């Protein structure tokens, strides 16, 4: 089952948010993410978190039984909303409105990809990128010229790519700009890693190098 979790960061375009919601069997708003959902014409099946960012207008537009207050100061509202989706059987979770604004919040939101490793396939989606954690080998979707970045969180060993413009073979990547702005050369394209936390950014646009 595929779920969409809408966080309370900078929202993506309405078109992207509606497309993600149309692909999901369950839409969960993380607290104030309810506002972004409603602005796109989406009524979430659940609003989860400490609910301190929910407005009276949100409550008026969403049935009261869809609000789930979870009080745990050690986790973020996004974390709580993902756990809610997983508990209801989600095998893939798309996360929207997780970036923008404060850099610390945006980076912390990306950490859920690592935190929920193995629990489900998690993707952070915005208008530029689909972001996921590489576990084993991951196919890279997109036509030739699709922008691809690989960002190591810490040290990653055995990074190998196939059919990118600049391929890596059993490479070691550290947290650095080294893997930024590669591109798909041809399909099938893929990336693999033997150890470490590697983030794959797959662009939603084509920008081939001259």
Image: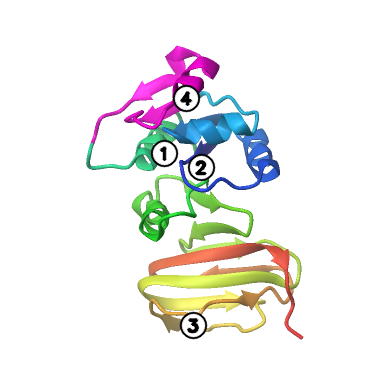
Camera-nearest label, 3 or 2: 3
Estimate the spatial distance between the alpha carbons at disc 4 and disc 2, rounded to whole Å. 14 Å
Q: Position of residue 204 (x, y in %)?
A: 68, 60
Q: Position of residue 68 (x, y in %)?
A: 37, 23
Quadrant of the image occupied by residue 158: bottom left
Camera-nearest label, 4 or 2: 4
* Numbered circle sitting on residue 82: 1
Residue at 51%, 39% (x, y): give it.
6
Q: Which residue is mark 4?
A: 46
**Alpha-carbon neighbours of circle 1 within 10 Å: few (<14), some, or many (≥20)?**
many
Q: Earlier in the sequence, mark 4 or mark 3?
A: 4
Residue at 44%, 13% (x, y): give it.
65
Q: Is residue 70 left or right of residue 40?
A: left
Q: Which residue is mark 3?
A: 178
Q: Which residue is mark 2?
A: 93
Estimate the spatial distance between the alpha carbons at disc 3 and disc 2, rounded to whole Å. 28 Å
Q: Position of residue 133 (x, y in %)?
A: 46, 59
Q: Earlier in the sequence, mark 1 or mark 3?
A: 1
Q: Earlier in the sequence, mark 3 or mark 2?
A: 2
Q: Which residue range is magenta in the image?
A: 46-72
- SS of the residue under disc 1: helix
Estimate the spatial distance between the alpha carbons at disc 1 and disc 4, rounded to whole Å. 11 Å
């Amino acid at each position: 089952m595929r779920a969409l979790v809408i966080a309370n960061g900078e929202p993506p375009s309405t078109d992207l948010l509606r497309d993600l919601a149309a692909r999901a069997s369950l839409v969960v708003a993380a607290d104030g993410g309810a506002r972004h959902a409603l602005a796109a014409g989406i009524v979430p099946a659940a609003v989860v978190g400490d609910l301190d960012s929910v407005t009276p207008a949100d409550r008026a537009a969403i049935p009261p039984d869809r609000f789930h207050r979870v009080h745990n100061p050690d986790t973020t509202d996004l974390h709580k909303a993902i756990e809610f989706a997983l508990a209801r059987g989600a095998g893939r979770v798309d996360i929207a409105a997780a970036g923008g604004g404060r850099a610390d919040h945006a980076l912390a939101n990306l950490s859920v990809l690592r935190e929920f490793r193995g629990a489900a396939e998690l993707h952070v989606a915005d208008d530029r990128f689909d972001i996921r954690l590489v576990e084993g080998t991951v196919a890279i979707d997109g036509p030739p010229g699709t922008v691809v970045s690989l960002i190591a969180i810490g040290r990653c060993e055995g990074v190998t790519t196939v059919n990118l413009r600049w391929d890596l073979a059993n490479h070691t990547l550290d947290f650095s700009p080294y893997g930024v702005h590669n591109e798909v050369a041809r399909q099938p394209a893929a990336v693999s890693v033997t150890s470490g936390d590697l983030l794959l950014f797959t662009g939603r646009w084509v920008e081939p190098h001259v």
